[in-house]
Amino acid sequence: MTKPADLKALGRAERLQLLRFVTSFAWADLSVSSAERDFIHRLVARLHLDKEEALLVEGWIKVPPPPDDIDPTTVPHAHRQVFLDTVREMMQADGDVSEEERENLALLEQLTR
């Protein structure tokens, strides 16, 4: 599990960026399962998002964030492992890691190294 201290180190922009990545990965197989949705809601709580931020995330659960908003090269170097770990946790939340999710994670890993 991603360490609370690692999540606490994220600023507002990085928290929202992380959730764009997480919700984007939840959409990799073209649907967001209830387990993935629950994981995202728990992550919103762990990140202490305000109401406005939580509403943004809720929108991404319903409609995936635009692909242009998901650029792995913009992830701050200091937070890349947190992003990878959190995305990996979300992928495993429903107990079914799809081929699309695996491929997207491999690409994310390559682009953030």
Image: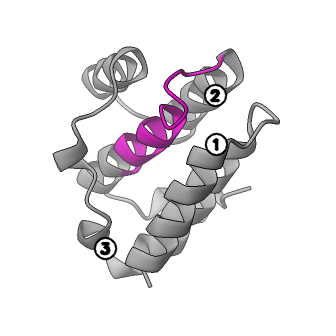
Reply above or below: 58 against 87. above
| Residue type for callout 3 | Pro
Q: Residue 75 in the image: x percent, y percent?
A: 31, 68
Identify the colour scheme used. Answer: one colour
The mark closer to the camera, 2 or 3, is: 2
Mark 2 → mark 1, Cα distance in angstroms: 6 Å
The mark closer to the camera, 1 or 3, is: 1
Left or right: 44 with respect to 71? right
Q: Measuring 34% from the left and 28% from the top, which residue is drawn there?
A: 64
Q: Which mark is residue 71?
A: none
Marked residue nearer the N-terminal end (1 or 3): 3
Residue on which disc 1 sits: 90
Left or right: 107 with respect to 97? left
Total labels: the figure holds 3
| Residue type for callout 2 | Glu
Residue on which disc 2 sits: 36
Q: Residue furthest left?
A: 68
Q: Residue furthest front?
A: 99
Mark 2 → mark 3, Cα distance in angstroms: 25 Å
Residue 14 part of the magenta-drawn span:
no
User: Would you say the residues marked 2 and 3 are in contact, meaning their CB atoms lie under 8 Å apart?
Assistant: no
User: Would you say the residues marked 1 and 3 are in contact, meaning their CB atoms lie under 8 Å apart?
Assistant: no
Residue on which disc 3 sits: 76
User: Considering depth in this image, is 52 or 31 the residue closer to the camera?
Assistant: 31
Q: Which stretch did the figure color magenta?
A: 18-33
Q: Residue 87 in the image: x percent, y percent?
A: 57, 52
Q: Measuring 51% from the left and 73% from the top, which residue is drawn there?
A: 109
